[in-house]
Amino acid sequence: MARCRWAPSSVQRGTLRMTRSSSFIEAHYGIATTRFRVMSDTSVKVPGPDGTPVPSTRNMQASTPNGTGVPTYFRKGFGLKSEIQSELASDYTGHLVDLLKDRDYTLTVDDLTIRLAKEFGFCYGVERAVEYAYQARKKFPDRTIYLAGEIIHNPHVNSKLQAMGITFLMPEKAGSGKAEAGSGGAAGGHIDFGGVKAEDVVILPAFGVTITDFEILRQIGCVMVDTTCGSVLNVWKRVESYARDGFTSLIHGKYYHEETRATASQAEKYEGGQYFIVRTMDEAGLVCDFIEGRLSAGALMERFAHAASPNFDPARDLKRIGVANQTTMLARESLAIGELIGQSMTRAHGPEYARENFRTFDTICSATQERQDAVVELLREPLDVMVVVGGYNSSNTLSLAALCSESVRTFHVEDADDINPASGVIRHRPLGSKEEVESSDWLPAAGPLRIGITAGASTPNNKIGEAVGRIFASRGIDPKTIQ
C-alpha cells in the first residue's frame, strides 16, 4: 500500500482504485453519496502543526431542483455507440496511420523514412469525451446543446462539434481582471450560463468544470452530459483529501487552464481549503524561498495573486503542503517540483516536520506519460526533423514538443493543413512563442531523410495521417500511391 512520500524515485503510480459507478464523479461535485474505494491514501484527519482542527466539509449535497426525479445527469453515455460509430470512424480514422502501425511504425518511400512514436494521438479519455458528445447529439436531436468550453484542445474536433449544432460557451479569458466567483483568485475562467434553460443540454468537457459551475447547472435543472476524464478525477480526489486534512494543494499546472481551475476548486469543498498554482521549477523555487525565509509573504503574493485561492496567507497556508498536478504537464517536472518542495520543508523545519506536513503523489495521467515515454524512445534514433501535431493550447502536446526540441529540430503544427507541399512552407509555433511563423527551408529538397512524428492525446488519427501524407507530398511523393 503506497504511502505519502516526496522522493520521486519512490513514487508509485496508479495506486488509486475507483469503481466505475457514475456516482463517483458526482461525489466530487458533492451531489451524491460517495461510492469509491481508496486503496492507497493512508492519510488521517490529524490536527495541523499548531493544533488547528480538521476543516469541516461544506454542505454540497444536492437534490433535484424541480423535484421531478427525472434524471438530468449522465456519465455513461446513452447506449448509442453503435449508431454513431460509423460517423466517428469517418471523421477520425487515418489510413496512413494504420499502415504505420502495421509496419512497425515505419514508412519508407524512396529516400524518405517516417517514424511514428509508438504511443500517440487520442487517449481513452478523449475518445470517450468525443463519443459522448456525438451520442448526446443523437439522443437529443431537437434540443439546444451547449458545451462548457472546448471538449478537448483540438481545433478540428471542436469545429466538427460546432458543425453538429453544438454551441460553445467559452470561459472568460485570463487577464480580463475578473475572478471566477467562488472559485479562487485566478483571473478569468468564468462561464456565463445565463442563456441555458432547463430543457437544454450541457456537455461538460474532458477537463471537468469547477464545483461552482456544476452547481449553477444543477440549479438550472438542465441535462448534463459529463465527459470528465477519469485521470482528472484521480487528481480531484487527491486535492479533496489534502483540503480535508488541512493541507494546501500546491498544483503544478497553468492557472488559466480549464482542468487546473476545476482541480483547484476541489479544495473549496472544505472550509478553509486552499490552493496555490505554480507552472515551472522557477516558480516552485519562489515558494521554497518563502518557506526558507528568503522571500516575504508580500513579495510572493505580488507574483502569485492570480494563481492562489482567495485571501491566501502564505504564513498560514504554506505550513502544510500537498503537491498535485494538471494531468498533462511534463511528468519529470512535476516529480522534480514535488522533490524540491519536500527538500525545502525539510531544510526549513526538519525531517520529522516534513514527514508530517508534506505530501506528494504522481498524478500525471498514464496516457500523457506513455506518449512522453514513447517520444523519448523515438528520440534515441537518428532523426533529421520531428513533427508534433496538436492544438497550440494543448498542454500534453506542448510537453511533447518541449521534449523533442531538446534533441532535434522540431516543428509543432496545430493541424495537417499547416504543412503546404505546393509551396514547401510549414506554418508552426516555436516552443515558447505565442505566434505562428512560416518556415520554407524545413525539408531538404533531396537526399536521405528521417522524420519522426507524434501527436498529443487530443489529436485524431486522420489529422496525423494527413500530416504524414503532406510530408511525403512535400518530397514529391503522392501519398495515394503508398500501399
Image (cartoon, grey):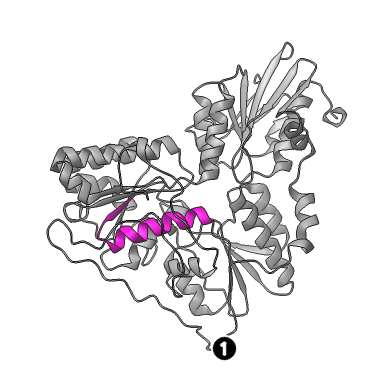
Residue at 65% over, 52% down: 127
Amino acid type, mark 1? Thr
Task: Measuring from the top left, give residue 141's x and y in whole percent.
Answer: 74, 71
Q: Which residues are magenta?
A: 229-250
The answer to whether residue 79 is left or right of residue 319 is right
| Residue 369 in view (yes/no) | yes
The answer to whether residue 210 is left or right of residue 472 is left
Tell me the crowding category of disc 1: few under 14, some 14 to 19, or many 20 or more residues within 10 angstroms, Cα based.
few
Q: Secondary structure at mark 1?
A: loop
Magenta-span inclusion, residue 233: yes
The answer to whether residue 228 is left or right of residue 8 is right
Residue at 52% over, 21% down: 407
For this orientation, the residue located farthest to the top is 447
Magenta residues: mostly which secondary structure? helix
Task: Measuring from the top left, give residue 107's x and y in whole percent.
Answer: 75, 25
Residue 312 picture quarter: bottom left
Q: Is residue 89 above or below residue 108?
A: below
Task: Measuring from the top left, give residue 91's x and y in whole percent.
Answer: 76, 50
Residue at 57% over, 32% down: 374
For this orientation, the residue located farthest to the left is 50
Q: Determine which residue is flagged by label 1.
A: 68
Position of the C terminus, as image quadrant, is: top right
